[in-house]
Amino acid sequence: MHCQFRFLAPALLLTLSSVGNLGAATTEELIEGIRRCHTQLVRLPDGWRQRFQWRAVSDPSGSFASDAVEGEIRCKWPKLYSKASLSFKSVGQPGEQTAREGSYNFDSKLSLAVEGKMLAQASPLRHLWSAVYLYPLICRHFSETHQLYFPGKPFTTDIYLPHAFDQHGQDYRVGPVESVAGVRCVILERPNYDKLWVAPDAGYVVCRREIRTGPNGVLRQRTEQRKLREVAEGIWVPMLQLQEEFDVHSGEPYRTWSVSTKSFKIGGLRDEELTVVIPEDVHQFENLVDNTVMRRPLGRSPFDTAVQESRLLLVAHKPPVSTLVALTLAVTVVMAALAHRVFYN
């Protein structure tokens, strides 16, 4: 027994010391650690790529357009690229498969986006697809996932990190030490609004976060970062992420999604892998930089093209079956008539 105690005592003292050190963390130290954690990953000099799967865990309201997304992020500042393969839910038939790519340059503000060979866009503003499919970063509330974030300019937010601290940093207080999925964390809290479980020993990753609405503190969203892995010195990445969303009035959960990282690799990115390539045979290319549009036919005849376009317009919508049939017929007839007129006149 005495011998066992000699081996256990140092471990116990180390644990107590670790808890004591965590408990001594200040608000300023925790906020600065979160900022550093954020910046080190997004601006890693060698860049990185992350392959992941987004999945709907619970969706009783049917609010998700897709059940699963296979995605990839490539980041080498100032360029950020995302790609997603997904199938939209559809009424009474298999989901429509599609692939979307988006890239954005934070310096030039140029955004490019492609959906298969159907649609391509070039824009002087950030395209939605270069932001919405950044699920691993969205789950960590990174400011770079927001379409209205521009480096060096004021960004007003209560949620996105680290800029939420710019507005409310003085309102946060340090709380007790707790564990999240086996990781020791210090609580950093803005009472009734925001509560973060921060892991100083794992690169200041926010392992859990609860966002509340208004002074009554109704829970709005809870996120968790699990299975942390150190991908570079001092840089930790979660291999599993969960996000629960709650009804802002009742506080009841209404949907949950997860992100599982399949691989994370640092370096080796070629410049052409960071920018969307516009296919030469894309059906429609909208160049919003110089306000030009180029279109190519989809089918062998104007009628074929009209039928295909009418189907594509309905892919992401889920109206009642009767409405779906009527709308499909109406759109097909109108577009076919217009195509016939253009073709024969």
Image (spheres, rainbow, N blue to C red):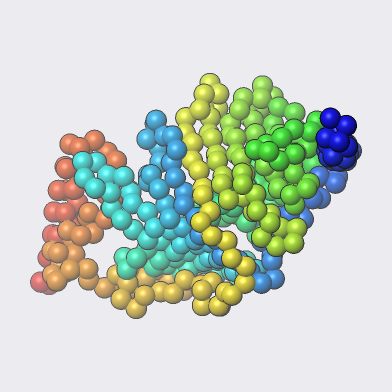
Residue 65 sits in quarter: top left
Q: How many marks?
A: 0
Q: Quadrant of residue 9?
A: top right
For this view, does 166 lie left or right of residue 49?
right
Does residue 243 appear in the picture of this structure?
yes
Residue at horizontal 44%, vertical 74%?
277
Identify the residue shown where x is 51% and y is 49%: 260
For this view, does 315 lie left or right of residue 223?
left
The reply to whether residue 129 is visible in this rendering is: no
- The structure residue drawn at horizontal position 41% and vertical position 61%, both measured from the top left corner, is 100
Height in image: 77 above or below 175? below
Q: Nearer the viewer, residue 261 or 93?
A: 261
What percent of the width, then of the height, locates residue 161?
69, 48
Quarter of the picture holding the N terminus:
top right
Which of the pair 280/136 is nearer the observer?
Answer: 136
Q: Position of residue 208 (x, y in %)?
A: 66, 38
- Is 58 left or right of 17, judged from the image as shown? left
Q: Is residue 166 above or below residue 217?
A: below
Answer above or below: position of 109 versus 26: below
Residue 73 at what x, y percent from top left?
A: 53, 61
Q: As drawn, which residue projects farthest toward the left?
A: 344
Give the percent coordinates (x, y) of residue 312: 26, 55
Image quarter hosting the C terminus = bottom left
Residue closest to the eye, 186 or 75: 186
Q: Is residue 315 left or right of residue 189?
A: left
Residue at image position (64%, 30%) is 212
